[in-house]
Amino acid sequence: MRDCELLGAAVDETDTYTRLGQEQANKLHLKYALCRIKACLLLKGKPVDELDDVALECKYPPELIVKNNYFFHYEDNFFGWYFDAELCYKASLSDYQRLVLLNDGDQYSSWRRYQTFYSTPEADRDYLSYWETVVKELKWLEQYLLTNESSIEAMFQAIRIASKFPCMTLKLAAVGLHEYIWNARIHLMFVKDLDGILYQIWRRVNADHQLRFRDALKQVYEANLFPAHDRSMKYELEYGDSKMELVFVKCTTGLSDGLPKDRARELIKQEIRWTRESSGTYERYARKKLKIAELIGLIPKDKIAAP
């Protein structure tokens, strides 16, 4: 298949064995210390345009950086990112490839695997374009997600899409398709129409403050308003350990009594998006990493679509 050949040709084996000498590594540590200093100044409100690299080097010379240990504690959670100590010794990697996002709270289920991609900024930007195209053009797949049908057709279509981007590889194409299918399946099974269920429960509880969550859920279930969720609602009613009530409390806390229906449901939907769809994909990882790399001056600025 021609598309597979194109993607196979894009594979550039990364040399992860050749190591830097200590003197070269020390220079990198000093360079990355300045990146951390720049990040601190950005957090304090300093405009990025005023953070000149030459001026920073003059203000924070090597002896000052060493004295204050500015390049230690790379893996703290202050910034949400760090330059991996082991990757810093791999000679063939770029600054961008050594940059790693923290996996705070296991946000990214395949975090360790993402680090082994050694993607360049160009590859990550191509991946984002590929992902957005897959999401748009594979919408038809949603009707088959719960039956595992048409996966072969989807795979071929994803490969055709990926072949249009010069820095895409078969590995990245496969990762993107797998994560898209997984997320879409989770959405269909647990998230789609959940805002409607929680809104209906909230409306009932809000109208009758004596009504418990379980009683309101039973009313919604018996009204057969959301048949696709009958199984999950029945499970919650019978066993009460599906965490649906916790999600309900989190998504409705703070909603005022007189809130219009559409606005209340929209606010619930927004909260669901954060609580139930926050599992990290490589799309989110790459998008965030590119933005960070641009801010601290590792790579030139480029247009990156908002998530």
Image: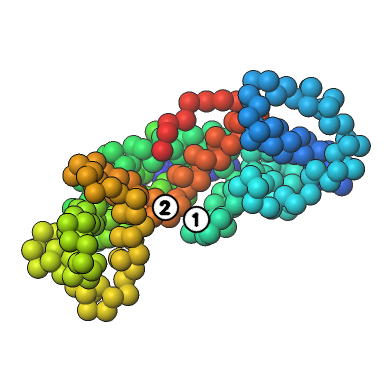
Which of these two is toward me, 60 or 1? 60
Q: Amino acid at mark 2?
A: Ser
The dot on residue 107 is 1
* SS state under label 1: loop
Quadrant placement of the C terminus: top left
Q: Are the residues at dot 2 and dot 1 in contact (C-beta closer than 8 Å)?
A: yes
Residue holding disc 2: 278
Q: CA distance from mark 2 to mark 1?
A: 7 Å
Spot occupied by residue 232 in the image (x, y as percentages of width and height): 23, 68
Q: Amino acid at mark 1?
A: Gln
Picture layout, residue 295 above or below residue 158: above
Q: Is residue 180 visible?
A: no
**Residue 29 placement, left or right of 267:** right
Q: Residue at x 69, y 37 (%)?
A: 40
Which of these two is toward me, 264 or 163? 264
* SS state under label 2: loop
**Residue 189 placement, left or right of 38:** left
Spot occupied by residue 81 in the image (x, y as percentages of width and height): 63, 46
